[in-house]
Image (tube, helix red, strand yellow):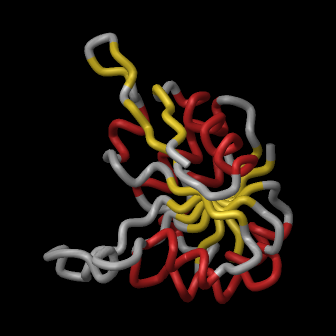
Amino acid sequence: MKIAIIGAGNVGSTLGEAWCALGHTITYGVPNPEDSKYLSLKEHSTVTFVRQAVKDSNICVLATPWSKTQEAIIQIGEDLDGKVLVDCTNPLKPDLSGLTVGHITSGAEQIAQWATKAKVGKAFNTTGFNIMADPVLEGRKTVMFVASDDGAARKQVAELATELGFDTVEVG
């Protein structure tokens, strides 16, 4: 599968490396693909601009800081139409003192409003990137909850989580 990962920080790079090792084609979408901080990613993946990464993908993984999430979705534009968008974000305040949304709506609901034609699935936001790299602890699989109001999208995201070694639970 061709997976676009928007954001190449701890979460994005960890998921990308793991899926690449499983045979998926990974393309990272970043603001400046020539930045030297992405050199190690180029050993196993393509690093390009955000919109180009999504254009050539089957599925898009959003692994951005909340403060950059809306901007990334705007950059992608209509290339998200009809695609599964995996939301790995948490709507944290910049100082990490709490949530910017989540009191009457959720971050995933906000993303669905920004990306109206994408099929949004929520996952990979309830554990650290270190667990994403190795989700088996003391011989037991870590649980990964997957939510979406689109059943096909939820199944696709759940399969990606299961491939990584998580005990995946679909929650609707």
Residue at 61 percent of width and 28 percent of height: 163
Residue at 59 percent of width and 47 percent of height: 16
Q: Position of residue 166 (x, y in %)?
A: 47, 29
Q: Quadrant of the rendered structure where residue 162 is?
A: top right
Q: Position of residue 81 (x, y in %)?
A: 81, 74
Q: Nearer the viewer, residue 16 or 117?
A: 117
Q: Is residue 18 above or below residue 31?
A: above
Q: Please, which residue is most extreme toward the top here?
A: 139
Question: Horizontally, is 50 left or right of 107 in the view?
Answer: right
Q: How many marks?
A: 0
Q: Nearer the viewer, residue 110 or 10?
A: 110
Residue at 56 percent of width and 88 percent of height: 71
Q: Is residue 146 above or below residue 11?
A: above
Q: Position of residue 143 (x, y in %)?
A: 39, 32
Q: Quadrant of the rendered structure where residue 142 is?
A: top left
Q: Nearer the viewer, residue 110 or 89?
A: 110
Q: Position of residue 165 (x, y in %)?
A: 50, 25
Q: Please, which residue is most extreme toward the left here?
A: 97
Report the quarter where the N terminus lies: top right
Question: Horizontally, is 133 left or right of 149 in the view?
Answer: left
Residue at 67 percent of width and 79 percent of height: 115
Q: Is residue 141 above or below residue 60?
A: above
Question: Horizontally, is 102 left or right of 28 in the view?
Answer: left
